[in-house]
Amino acid sequence: MEKFIIRGGKRLVGDVMVSGAKNAAVAILPAVILADAPCTVENLPWIEDVNILCDIFEQLDVRVEQLSERRTMIDPTKMRSYKASFETVSRLRASYYLLGAMLGKFGHAEVALPGGCEIGQRPIDQHLKGLRALGAQIEIERGNIVAHCENGLVGAEVYLDVVSVGATINIMLAAAKAKGLTTIVNAAKEPHIVDVANFLNLSGASIKGAGTDIIRVHGREYLGGCTYQIIPDQIEAGTYMIAAAATRGDVCVRNVIPTHLEAVSAKLMEMGVRVTEGDDGRDFFIRVQADKAPRPVNVKTLPYPGFPTDLQQPIMAMLSVAKGTSVIVENIWEDRFKHVGQLRRMGANINIDNRVAIVEGVKALSGAPIYASDLRAGAALVVAGLMAEGRTELNNVDFIDRGYEAMEKKLSALGADIKRASDGKAMVY
């Protein structure tokens, strides 16, 4: 197992380039399956979740060819199998998107139940409800989701009982080639939902309303190839914004869409951080400047455009040294405070009551051996290590690799003292 060795107390300064959005990439790649011609995907982040999907594609006879550092060709035209094995699928939460894509392409799908980070109950009942509404017959057999629709999917109205990003995308994928009109009511609005819809539309689909709570999909028989650029990753951008502020640094976070980060920017400004947006003709950027301990604030996670649950953990690390008491309410996942025990090991004063965290600011954190329990917990502990006095040894960085591309290299370029190590030795690149 690899680890990060972090010597804290270094102020982050400089420019950092944000990669393509993880949550968009892991949905757009399955969406490519629906195409009847090769597609080229640009700005694809080379993270572990994408690598796993590429492994699955290899098993399914979907050809993946990296044309350049940021351009990847994916050819699904020789794909014949509609079965995704447990060995690969169990490593990836977003593997459930294969279900909607393969149902739309073949009328059949057999996908093992998804894996991913353990951050609470993550049922897929809304996914299955939507697919059944389109005519699929679905059974759970020995840990596999087995779905088929002999005569093809047919459009229908689907009302989601709860707002679900995954279910919204999965139904949208299945409906792209279904007969007639599908209407998704109470749909999620996240930017990567819009990105998936834009990709499908560029391929010839007809999807309207993405980004609102009602999405209408007119099924199309044929979807052609296209070249598509994935949006920047709002969560990676938000993580570096928080890290910059937590270290009292001065960082330009580049290749961002500022409107996707309004909730994060507003909360940082409430904490006394200076946040400014800019456009230098090459890309949009957000500059984050801080020179003192943050003010305490209250944070409530909400579906987009509210404060994102994926940044609750990193901002908690920053608030652990605020001058006063902060209250964090986690409204999305019921088990997303697993990082708290590790922050306490570093000296944080945090009390948990169900979904509420009371964070009493301390003067400083101290480096310690700590362990990441999931992707965003890992990011939070990196932020804590950058702030802390002394040496932090962060284990289980494979969680971080699932969603952040070369995090330690990007932070090192900003002046952080962070190295990847294996068996106690620094990795040589």
Image (tube, rainbow, N blue to C red):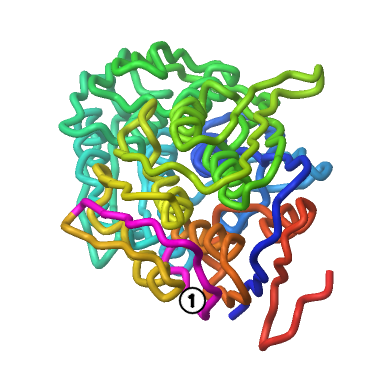
- Report the side of 287 relative to 350 (left or right): right
Q: Which residues are magenta?
A: 355-374
Magenta stretch contains residue 89: no
Quadrant into which the C terminus falls: bottom right
| Residue designated by label 1 | 370
| Amino acid found under the numbered disc labelled 1 | Ile
Magenta stretch contains residue 371: yes
How far across and how far down the image is residue 37, in percent?
65, 30
Give SS at disc 1. Answer: strand
Residue 287 in the image: above or below residue 359: above
Residue shown at 41%/31% (left/top)?
173
Residue shown at 15%/32% (left/top)?
161
177, 350: nearer the viewer: 350
Residue 337 in the image: above or below residue 76: below
136, 364: nearer the viewer: 364
Q: Magenta region, mostly helix, strand or loop?
A: loop
